[in-house]
Image: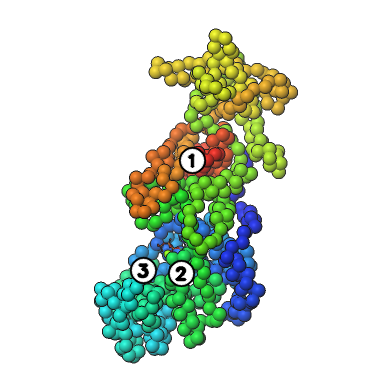
Amino acid sequence: MSTDHTNGHTPPAPASSNFLRGIIETDLTAGAYAERKDSQGQPLPQVVTRFPPEPNGYLHIGHAKSICVNFGLARDYAGRCNLRFDDTNPEKEEQEYVDTIIDSVRWLGFDWKDSTGEHLYFASDYFDQLYSMAEYLITADLAYVDSQSAEQMAANRGNFGEVGKDSPFRNRSAGESLDLFRRMKAGEFKDGEHIVRAKIDMASPNMNLRDPAIYRIRHAHHHRTGDKWCIYPMYDFTHPISDALENISHSICTLEFQDHRPFYDWLLEHLSSAGFLQKPVPHQYEFSRLNVTYVITSKRKLRQLVDEGIVDGWDDPRMPTLVGIRRRGFTPESLQLFCDRTGVTKSDGWIDMSSLEGALREDLDPKAPRASAVLQPLKLIIDNFPEGETVACHAPVYPPAHPEHATALRHFPISNTLWIEQEDFMETPVKGYFRLFPPTADKPGSRVRLRHGYVVECTGFEKDADGKVIAVHCTYFPDSKSGTEGSANYKVKGNIHWISVAHAVEAEVRLYDRLFTDPHPDAGGKDFKAALNPNAKKVITAYLEPGLKDAKAEDRYQFERHGYFVADRIDSQPGKPVFNRTVTLKDSWVK
Ligand code: ATP
Ligand code: MG
């Protein structure tokens, strides 16, 4: 059986326009970033974006949005997108997260390589430059060392509607501040004893301009710089400078950073005028974050799910992490399609989970090979089929709507004992039921087509001592085989799938569903654990058609009538497949 190659790069659907594209196109027309040169004097691309994760956790669906926006714009405007780890926080960061983030961005289909090399960066690589720039700001009376306690500093910061108070250390001389800063660096002080602040305006209506902190003391080991530093630059100081050092043109982030933009601009204006950074400097643009219904993305809450054993780890297929989503069976192309469709706006809103699932179905429908799987098995015995014999049957691997694959066939035998779905038999059929039901005094049993096989007529059934149906009996019509002339003589309304018992592959199948039953599990401070879906994972033993025996990890299939499934990338092995249900064929969550 052939497999899909969903890691291949299909060309993206034409991207719809949005305000960021508008800005970029205006800048391109004006040549706003046309004159910049790299350190070798070579012209830089006019569009340079970046994805700047903090390596302190696993990426989730919201990050996928940011990745698709940043890398997507770079791709569409012949630019470049850097992957930059914002690793200024020594305590929380680890190499493990760096590795998984790199892996997830690659899996999503993006790359930070171009003709000039690899554009993978770490903010910690700029610690020396950041330090020099902080020294410059102090010398230029644009920053000072504050020695207030954290409590005093908070009290003097003021509030919305209440101006802040200048620190008593605000007017200490540049020489004194510089000396203290150097001694901070030399390790003479304890955490929190001093802090470096930009000197802007303690009365600004924007709290972010009330002398924001730019350097703090932290006697902590850093995952890359080790014990070299005991002072670390603050995020709001590091981020704009890292953008400028990397020649970012359009620095795209989520709306909560809007109030940080004035400091971004203040800093880059001063440092570029002083010759530390090339002009024109990058500009920050904000868009609304992606919120998906039935999903939580808070790192703290996701960690709780893992730590309390509610899910089976960060890559549990129910998790909204990219490692979880991947293991669930989503394709990178479906995530790109979804992110593209959800657009880029400035207004916060919720995207329905069904549009993510819809994008997946749309992506997989043409490329997922079809297969049969019986998930709730019941035996069907064909009493007039010779015992021990088999007849070869076949079916197209891909649906007829896709003529490019028309010749690919899958092969499987029929015999006298088959697995069918329990729901394909009813002892007493309800109105409109066209599948198997037994004869009654005045009516023969129903006739159905065994897909890609023969037409059979139901003749009876067996029950166990508890009254449970354990086998259904039928007879078949030898001249009714699909694809033969005689088949046209049989008009039946029911069409069911089946697998020969002797040839079926027994496999563990995990039926996954949404993790929460509430579309907004943690809205308004609700207890998200109260909204857990008890049916989000069911493990069953199913029977698969013979060709699935050698499925490779991450091979995806449509199990006909059931949904899309993927061979689990960790637990599945050729010869012993384990499948995860990625999504059902139809949305059962529509209200
Ligand atoms: P933290 O609270 O730890 O900062 P974070 O989700 O912001 O968590 P980062 O590693 O800082 O994690 O995120 C990297 C980038 O991804 C940032 O630019 C951030 O704006 C973006 N991002 C995070 N969540 C979303 C989301 N839901 N939609 C769009 N972009 C997002
Ligand atoms: Mg963040």
Instruction: Please name which of the two marks, 3 or 2, marks the residue nearer to the observer.
Output: 2
> What residue sits 60% from the left and 25% below the top?
494
Mark 2: few/some/many CA within 10 Å (<14, 14-19, 20+): some
Figure quadrant of the N terminus: top right
Tag count in the figure?
3
In the picture of the structure, the residue carrying the numbered disc 1 is 591
Mark 3: few/some/many CA within 10 Å (<14, 14-19, 20+): many
Among the two numbered marks 1 and 3 on one chain, the one whose residue lies closer to the N terminus: 3
Q: Is residue 324 visible?
A: no
434 versus 157 height, above or below? above
Q: Is residue 200 visible?
A: yes
In which quarter of the view is residue 27 placed?
A: bottom right
Residue 559 is situated, as x and y percent measured from the top left of the image, at 56, 36
Q: Are marks 3 and 2 in contact (CB under 8 Å)?
A: no
Instruction: Please name which of the two marks, 1 or 3, marks the residue nearer to the observer.
Output: 1
Residue nearest the observer in this picture, 210 or 427: 210
Residue 489 is situated, as x and y percent measured from the top left of the image, at 71, 20
Instruction: Please name which of the two marks, 1 or 2, marks the residue nearer to the observer.
Output: 1
Please give left or right for residue 151 compared with residue 552 in the image.
left
Q: Residue furthest top?
A: 441
Q: Ligand 1 near label 3 (Cβ, under 8 Å)? A: no
In the picture of the structure, the residue carrying the numbered disc 2 is 258
- At numbered mark 1, what does the secondary structure look like: helix, strand or loop? loop
- At numbered mark 3, what does the secondary structure look like: helix, strand or loop? helix
Which quadrant contains ligand 1?
A: bottom left
Residue 201 is situated, as x and y percent measured from the top left of the image, at 38, 81
In which quarter of the view is residue 208 placed?
A: bottom left
Disc on res. 90: 3
